[in-house]
Amino acid sequence: MAPKKHHYLAVDDEDTEGADVQHRYTNPRHALSVFTLSLGLLAVLLVGAIGGFYAGSSYIRRTTEENSAVQESPIILDPVTVKFTSNRAFLQRPSKQTEELWKTLYPKDTHGLFEYPDNNPERSGFAAFHQLHCVDALRRGYYQREDVIGAIRAKQSPPEFEHEVDETHTLHCIEFLRQSIMCHADTTVQTEATYHQGILAFGVEYQCKNWWQLVDWVDPSQSFDTVNNQLHLHIVLMTVAMIPPDTLVFPKPNPINQLIPIITLMLDTKPLHPTCVSTLLFNR
C-alpha cells in the first residue's frame, strides 16, 4: 500500500494557518459551549422582555383604572356662558354680613361634604368648594395682614392669626390654586386693556359650568318644589332682578326688606342681612 501523502506548511505560514486549523478542528466542544451559552442568554433576555411587557401592561391598566376611579364624578354639570363682572361685595373686610354672603355660595349646613360612595366611612367633597374656600381664606388673610400692619404702626399688639389664614394654610391655598388653574387651563381669549397695562378679565364671556347645579346636588334641600318642578332659589332671584332698575333703588317701602322674609323661608335659615339679599339679586 502506498504511503499517505502529507502536505506540510511552510514555516512562515505555520503560525497563522495552523492556528486556524486548530480552532476549526481541534475544539468542537468549545464552539458548542459558546453557542449554548449565547442561546441561553437570548432566552433569558426574551423571557425578561415578555415578563416586563406584561408587567408594564398590567401596571398601566391598573394605574388607568385607579385614575379613572379618582377622576370619576357623580355629577355632570351643564355648560353655561357667564360674563364676568366685578362684585366688590365679596371683597369686603370680614364681618358677619360678608361671612353670611360667602356662605350663600356653598351648600347649606354641609360645608360642601357628602357621602360618596354610600359605603365610604369618610365624607367627600368637590374640589371646587375647596378651591373657593381657599379664595376666601386669601381674602381674610389679606385683611388680617392689614390689621397686623395697622397694629404695629399704632404700637399695639397684633391680632392672632386664625388657622385658616396662617402662613401654612395660606401657602397651601396658593399652591393648590396654582395647580388647579393649570389643570383646567381656561382658554377664554382676553383682550388687552387700552386704559392700563394688563389684560381685561371682566366684561368677558366665559364658558363655565353650572355652579348652582353643583350646590343643589350636595344639598337638595336648597331647592323647592313648585308645580312639580324643581326650581333653585337663584332662578327666583334672577326673575326678581328683571324688575326695572328704577323700582329697585330702595323706595319706601324697601322691596329688599319685603323679600327678606320670603327668601328666609325658602332657605330655612336665619334672617338674611339686606346686603346679602341685594347682592344675590344683582349678581346672579
Image (cartoon, grey):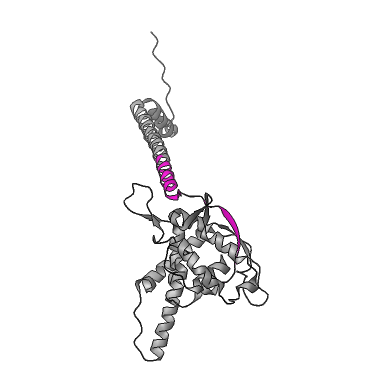
- Decide: is 68 above or below 104: above
- Decide: is 195 above or below 205: below
Extent of the magenta region: 58-86
Q: Position of residue 201 (x, y in %)?
A: 60, 69
Q: Residue at x 64, y 71 (%)?
A: 245
Determine which quarter of the picture holds residue 210.
Answer: bottom right
Q: Residue at x 39, y 88 (%)?
A: 152
Q: Nearer the viewer, residue 178 or 118?
A: 118
Locate the C terminus and report the quarter of the image it occupies: bottom right
- Decide: is 76 above or below 39: below
Locate the N terminus and report the quarter of the image it occupies: top left
In the image, is residue 254 part of the stretch drawn in magenta?
no
> In the rendered image, is residue 139 in sight?
no
Residue 121 located left or right of residue 50: left
Q: Position of residue 67 (x, y in %)?
A: 43, 48
Q: Nearer the viewer, residue 147 or 44?
A: 147
Determine which quarter of the picture holds residue 31.
Answer: top left
In the image, is residue 78 part of the stretch drawn in magenta?
yes
Q: Position of residue 254 (x, y in %)?
A: 55, 75
Q: Position of residue 78 (x, y in %)?
A: 55, 52
